[in-house]
Image (tube, helix red, strand yellow):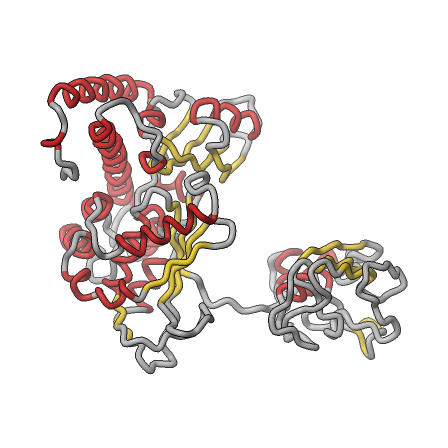
Amino acid sequence: MKEFFNYSCVPLRAMILVIIIISLSSSIATKQRRRYLTSFDYHELISNDFEEHSRRLLETNRIGMEEIERHWNQSVAFQWEHVKTVEMNRRLRANTGITNDLYDKFPFVVCNHRAGLDGVERKTEVEKHFGKGSSDIIYNQETKTCFFVNALASVAELSPSSYMVHPISSVMKFRKGLMKTIMEKHVEIDYLNNSTAPPLRYHADLCFGAVQSRQGAEQLAKKLTKIIGLTSSPDHYLASETSFFVDSRFNDNEEQNKTFWKDNGEGGSAKRDCVVLYRNLVFSPNVLGTAVNIFLSKGNSTNEWAIPQLDVKVTSRCLLSVVLGIASQPEVCSVSEIGDGRTSNIEPKWIVQSDIPYRTPFTNNGLDGNGQIVAISDTGLDVDNCYFWDSENQLPKNGAIDRSARKVIQYVPYADSKESVAGHGTHVAATLLGSRAKNGRVEDEGPANGIASGAKLSMFDMNIAENPGESSSV
């Protein structure tokens, strides 16, 4: 394994002492730590690109399940060594005991299998070991409850024997379909005066507890701006040593895969060729500080979704280097593409009721929400939309209640009394209970009637509308 720390600056006595402590801890931990998750167990918890690629290889008979598990086990074992080495290096730097630096911690999946406990009790047990408020539940069944946990490697290794503790490497953070998108959608694209170029938008979810505020997320965004494409990371080397899912040219050649990843992650040709892309990337934290969105600079445009008009050439190798650099950060738990979203209220009704196209057994048997009132807090509502319009009752948007109204019995104008064109609140309300009416009064079976189309609505407007319009396109 490569070394990423210069030991020459550490006093010899301190180094020997810490190495002895680490060795003893590792010896005890090895005896106590349970086996980690198999690839099948992990895929059951988290949809990821390793699963997607493995499935494609199995379907084409290019690789067997035994070989897939070999790669998986190699990746997990390597990640364990990586997180332990990072912790040891940090201890040596501090020249004293374990520091409380957040970035000494790495993300793990922890599954508590202890029988006779419910999810809450298992969570209490996990946090007794890892610390209060340290876990975020991701899976809960009778046989096990699993969590995301940010922890020191030494703490994770000394987990109770009833736990499965699994370190999350960079490539395990790639959500399903990410690699396919990078390798096929962005082979080589010139964004200058190219209106048909696909948008470049990615989303990095931050690990639970890793960043406590928007300010913390902003600091991470600044860190990403500085390091992407400029520094080497041990996780890049990890990926080059263990990954085998790159693209169709390399799927069955492990050595070529290692070379490909190493070149993209450790300062090879990808970094030299992609400097312009790196300089034009924008890292934007969300309001809650739980994620960072990544997109190309739009120049003077304030629209994050606009196609950039920059003299930037984007290639698969460039993007691979970017997403791997993001995923290598211990504060990041997953990386995915932000897809092209579209609003559509036609499908949800049958998806919820049967998941069979256009089959609605609840509605067919009279369970349509009639007599029920749904309360929604959102951006507002376009009351003139045909799925909410009432030609006989002009709703006063002052919080008053009118139970005789066709659909909207109350509108509370907390932020304002307006809705943006194609507003989110109208879309959500229509999905849940929208119902078209002829002439604003006689109920009609509209093509986009909501899941509970017989219900009525109480709307709490909690957002100031941008570009408010008289009607919505929903």
Percent across and percent down for residue 364 are 76, 60
Residue visible at 44% across and 31% down in the picture: 111
**437 and 216: which is toward the camera:** 216
Percent across and percent down for residue 281 are 33, 63
Quadrant in which the N terminus is drawn? top left
Quarter holding residue 367 = bottom right
**379 and 75: which is toward the camera:** 379
Percent across and percent down for residue 47 are 42, 49
Q: Report whether 285 appears left or right of 359.
A: left
Residue visible at 39% across and 20% down in the picture: 161
Quadrant in which the C terminus is drawn? bottom right
Q: Report whether 381 appears left or right of 319.
A: right
Q: Report whether 458 appears left or right of 347.
A: right
Quarter holding residue 177 = bottom left
**313 and 73: which is toward the camera:** 313
Quarter holding residue 429 = bottom right
Residue visible at 78% across and 56% down in the picture: 369
Q: Is residue 1 visible?
A: no
Residue visible at 40% across and 20% down in the picture: 160
